[in-house]
Amino acid sequence: KAGVTQTPRYLIKTRGQQVTLSCSPISGHRSVSWYQQTPGQGLQFLFEYFSETQRNKGNFPGRFSGRQFSNSRSEMNVSTLELGDSALYLCASSLMGEETQYFGPGTRLLVL
Amino acid sequence: GEDVEQSLFLSVREGDSSVINCTYTDSSSTYLYWYKQEPGAGLQLLTYIFSNMDMKQDQRLTVLLNKKDKHLSLRIADTQTGDSAIYFCAEWGPGRRALTFGSGTRLQVQP
């Protein structure tokens, strides 16, 4: 079974721009969660989607949003990028949400 | 709130055992996980333990859970240079419905 895939792997953007990251979960997994990893704050939960609905959200500003499609693929969007948004964005999938989460390789975003 | 703490660094010699420790605060945690992260990579699931267990063994890996003290440890037997990485402890909080991670322990294996 293929693992979690994320595209693109690397992105460079400038302040004020917006960005969309994509995540394809493991086949059969319906829950997709997003995490941000930075050297200063570590790994922090962004949000979780299940059956095309946001089921849970972490403590991030409204500039961070996401969605999930009927095939369980998910996208996250960050608008009006700030320098502090530079991070590794990790996507994780699980069957229904309560089970073990499997992570993708991440998208490394650099904001200049 | 929920908090997970780990020591930052551990150095061992190849062939020795490594023990990485973690403490957590959420007593309602149902599952506790160990993930491994190599440079430039995502998180690789190593093992997990359900909160009503006190030990789990999986090949070279042994997880010990002391629920009373909220202490979790990961022992890697016969540590190899390929085990050099950052190891993250994480707890699943059913109320929060998300993983809370420790800051990670960097394991350095010296030949």
Image: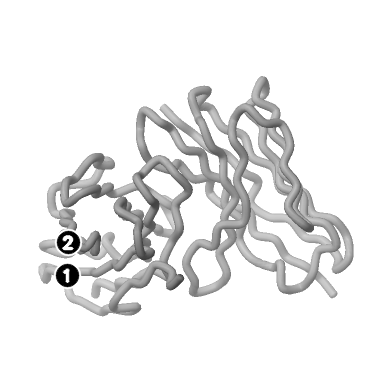
Circle 1 residue: A19
B25 sits left or right of B12 in the view: left
Q: CA distance from mark 2 to mark 1?
A: 5 Å
For the C terminus of chain B, the image quarter is bottom right
Amino acid type at circle 2 is Val
**Residue drawn at x 29%, y 49% as measured from the top left:** A46
Q: Position of residue A2 (x, y in %)?
A: 43, 72
- Chain on which label 1 sits: A
- Tell me: residue A111, above or below residue A42: below
Which of the two residues, B74 or B5, is positioned nearer the viewer here? B74
> Which element type, helix, strand or loop, lies under badge 1?
strand
Residue at image position (29%, 76%) is A7
- Residue A69's tag is none
Q: Position of residue B84 (x, y in %)?
A: 69, 68
Q: Decide if residue B22 is on the left or right side of residue A24.
A: right
Question: What residue type is disc 1 on?
Answer: Val
Whether label 2 touches label 1, CB < 8 Å = yes
Residue A105 sits above or below residue B105 on the image: below
Residue at 42% from the left image edge and 52% from the top image edge: A43
Residue beneath disc 2: A78
Residue A9: image quadrant is bottom left
Q: Position of residue B32 (x, y in %)?
A: 56, 39
How is colour applied across the structure in the image? one colour
For residue B68, what is the image quadrant? top right
Task: Identify the residue at the far top of this view.
Answer: B68
